[in-house]
Amino acid sequence: MDSKVEGTEAQKFVWEGAIPIQIHLHDSEVTTLPNPPPALILAPRLGYLPLLVRQIKPFFSSSLPPGVDTVWFEYKGLPLKWYIPTGVLFDLLCAEAERPWNLTVHFRGYPGKILTPCEGEDSVKWSFINALKEAACIITGNCKNIMNMSQSDQTDLWRSVLNGDMDAYLRVSSKLKLCTIGDDHSMKFNTTLKSRQSTIDTDVTAPARTGRIPVRLYIRSINEDIDDLEDAPTIDSWDKISYINRPFEIQGEGECFTLYDAVKTLLPELFADKHLLADDVSKGEMEDGQLSEEVSCSRTSEEAGVTSTDYVESPSDTAEIKLLRIQGIEPKMEIPFGWVVNNLTNPEHYLHICVYIKAVEPITI
């Protein structure tokens, strides 16, 4: 019998994390008087907005016009990307935490030019599985362990995410051997990812030991000179946000590698030879780590968070991080990055980092 796999206290807090959401039916779809009251839902941070539909549709069903449902959500006029975890959307779009989070739901008029198609829970499931494949390719060099999952394990893994059941998730995910790095304080950054030739034969039956970390960065630029994040301008277009897949590698020996070091390394274009969070950054000797593995799966380039030209606005000579959030937390920059990865990673094994930067002039990332 397999020994029980237990999560850390921090992981338990992450899995129990939820956002109070007040959901309004869009006025154009209301067919009754008076207007229906908003629905109040406690949405899991690790979940996805389309998974809330089975709860909210009965609430609004008597007020909906006839027709086929094509459900989507918006926040202050911005259609929300359904494949981004709910907690990440909240951290990215609400500079000052808004509780409850006021969203508008639509059951008609899907904005196909802005959002990729979503066929409900099934689309979310396969988006999750494909993200898991991408993460496995980064960590081990291939996704054989995901492709070889039994149907029952795949079902149990997805059900654990649906139900927010961390114990069930750990029982199944431990079989995938996607452990990344140790949780000690002695980890050294290696700037060069291994090539496909050196990783393709990775033993998928053993945990990965090289510390290749799947990271997804969401960068929101604030051009205005503001003193309070509450005054940050509303995001009305996804063109104003860059999201970048930028994996890199940590090895198990050397000096302490912190979140501060990770941010410097993940964003060398912005912060090499510049100031980061009011601290001096020594002249960088690190080169930008490039993704060495081409992940082959059914995700669109937009859904994977990759665009042909990832773009962010940044000052040409100075850049200031106004806010950095991971799982709703604003961690201290000196925290060991190994702890961050092992405790704050999402179930698909990506570490999602939301960064607000004060920016003036555009540069290309």
Image (cartoon, rainbow, N blue to C red):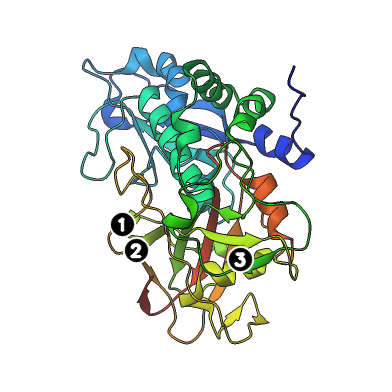
Residue appearing at x 59%, y 49% in the figure:
97
Residue 130 pos. (x, y %): 41, 36
Which quadrant, please, contains the C terminus? bottom left
Badge 1 is on which residue? Answer: 307
Q: Are marks 2 and 1 in contact (CB under 8 Å)?
A: yes
What secondary structure is found at the residue carrying circle 1? loop
Q: Amino acid at mark 3?
A: Ala
Looking at this view, is 60 or 194 the one in front? 194
- Calculate the distance from the C-alpha at mark 2 to the C-alpha at mark 1: 6 Å
| N-term mark: 1 or 3 | 3
Badge 2 is on which residue? Answer: 310
Above or below, comparing residue 277 to residue 95 in the picture: below
Above or below, comparing residue 142 to residue 21 in the picture: below
Residue appearing at x 57%, y 41% in the figure:
346
- Calculate the distance from the C-alpha at mark 2 to the C-alpha at mark 3: 19 Å
Q: Tell me the crowding category of disc 1: few under 14, some 14 to 19, or many 20 or more residues within 10 angstroms, Cα based.
A: some
Badge 3 is on which residue? Answer: 262
Above or below, comparing residue 269 to residue 232 in the picture: below
- Calculate the distance from the C-alpha at mark 1 to the C-alpha at mark 3: 22 Å
* Direction from residue 7 to residue 261 in the image, left or right: left
Q: Amino acid at mark 2?
A: Asp
Q: Quadrant of residue 229?
A: bottom right
Residue 192 pos. (x, y %): 51, 68
